[in-house]
Amino acid sequence: MPRILLIEKNELSCRILEQQLKRKGYDVITSTEGGDQGIVLAITASPDLILVGTELPMINGWQVARILKESTVTQKIPVIILTTPISLTELAMLSDSHYDGYSLKPINIKSLLGKIEALLKGLSVAIDVDTDTQDRSVSQQSHVQKEELRNVNSATPLQRKTLNIDISTYKSCQKQVSAGPMIFYIDNNLVDSHAVAKISQDAGYTYASYTDSFQALPLLVKFQPRLILLSARMPVVDGYELCTRVRRISDIENTPVIIMSNNDSVVDRMRAKAAGASTLLKKPIQEARVLRVLQQYLQPIEVGRTIKYNQQYQYGF
C-alpha cells in the first residue's frame, strides 16, 4: 500500500483529503503543525509521495518542497504542491523544476489522484503553469507584470544551491565502525569550520560541516550527531532559531547544542539558553576552548580496547 505524507495547515481540509485518499487505498500520514514537522516526517516515515500545502507555519510549503528536493535524503520522493497562486512569484515557483507536480485549490480530487497515480508509477507530470491559471492570477496585474509573466515558462529553473557537505566525511562515518562520535558544525564561515574540523579530527572525533542553516534539519535528523555546533550569525536562519527547531524534533531534541558567537554577554547567553542551547562558546575559535567543550559533552571512557562515550550532559550556563 503506497504511503502518502500530507502536509497541510488547515485541519479540516487535511482531514477531508486524507479520507478521500484512504478510500483509494493509500496509507496516509498527516502533518498540520508546520513545515519543520513535515520535513521530519518526510525523513522518518519514508513516504512514497508527499503533498505539501504552501501556507504552513514556521517553514512555508515552497521552502519545504525546496528543502526536500535539495536534500539527498528525500530528493527522490515525488512532491506535489497544493496551492492557490496569488502572485507572480508563486507562479514562477510553479514553473520551477524542484517540484514534481501541483494542484490548485480548491482541490480537484480526480485530477490530483491522476497525478499521484502517475508519479507513483514513475511517470512525469507536466508542471508548466497552464493558461487558465495565468489568466486568473494576472487579470489585475499591470502591463509590466504581465510581460514578466510571459517569461515564466521560458525561464530556466532556479539554480540550486550547492550543498557544502563533506561527503567523504559522511562515507567514512558509515564505513568506520571505530570512528569517534560525530560532531556536526553548521556555519557559513568556512575559516571557522576548517578550524573546528582540525581540532575535532585531531582529537579523534568524526566531523561534518554544513554551510546552509536553512536546509540543515534533514541532515541532522539523518545522521544524528552526538554534538551540534551552531554559529549564532547565519543568513535566513540564525543559530538561535535553528537550535529552537532542533529542540522540537524528538530524534535530536536531547543532543547537546553549542552556540558559537562573537559575543558572550549576559544577554547573548540568556538568548542561547532560551533557545535551548547547552552552552555558548565565544569566537574566535581557540583550540583550548573547543577541546574543553568537547570533553565536557563527549567524555570518552576507555574500557579495555573499547571506547564508550558518555552521552549525559548538563547545561553549561
Image (cartoon, grey):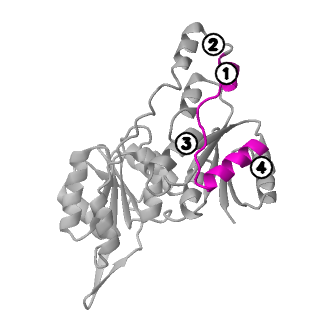
Give yes or no for contact between labels 1 and 2 (Cβ–Cβ under 8 Å).
yes
* Residue 151 falls within the magenta-colored stretch: no
Q: Residue at x 59, y 58 (%)?
A: 41
Q: Position of residue 305 (x, y in %)?
A: 25, 89
- From this view, report whether residue 86 is shown above or below residue 41: above
In space, the residues marked 3 and 2 are separated at their CA atoms by 26 Å
Prevailing SS of the magenta stretch: helix
- For label 1, the residue is 137
In space, the residues marked 3 and 1 are separated at their CA atoms by 20 Å
Which callout, 3 or 2, points at the residue further toward the start of the chain?
A: 3
Q: Amino acid at mark 1?
A: Ser
Q: Amino acid at mark 3?
A: Tyr
In space, the residues marked 3 and 4 are separated at their CA atoms by 20 Å
Q: Say what secondary structure mark 3 lies in.
A: loop
* Residue 132 falls within the magenta-colored stretch: yes
- For label 3, the residue is 99
- For label 4, the residue is 17
In space, the residues marked 1 and 4 are separated at their CA atoms by 25 Å
Q: Judge from the rendering whether residue 233 lies leftward or rightward of residue 168; answer left or right.
A: right
Which callout, 2 or 4, points at the residue further toward the start of the chain?
A: 4
Please report the bounds of the magenta region as a residue range.
110-138
Which callout, 3 or 4, points at the residue further toward the start of the chain?
A: 4
Q: Judge from the rendering whether residue 206 lies leftward or rightward of residue 115; answer left or right.
A: left
Q: Amino acid at mark 2?
A: Gln
In space, the residues marked 1 and 2 are separated at their CA atoms by 8 Å
- For label 2, the residue is 141
Which callout, 1 or 4, points at the residue further toward the start of the chain?
A: 4
- Front residue of 243/316: it is 243
Q: Residues within 10 Å of mark 2 (few under 14, many from 20)?
A: few
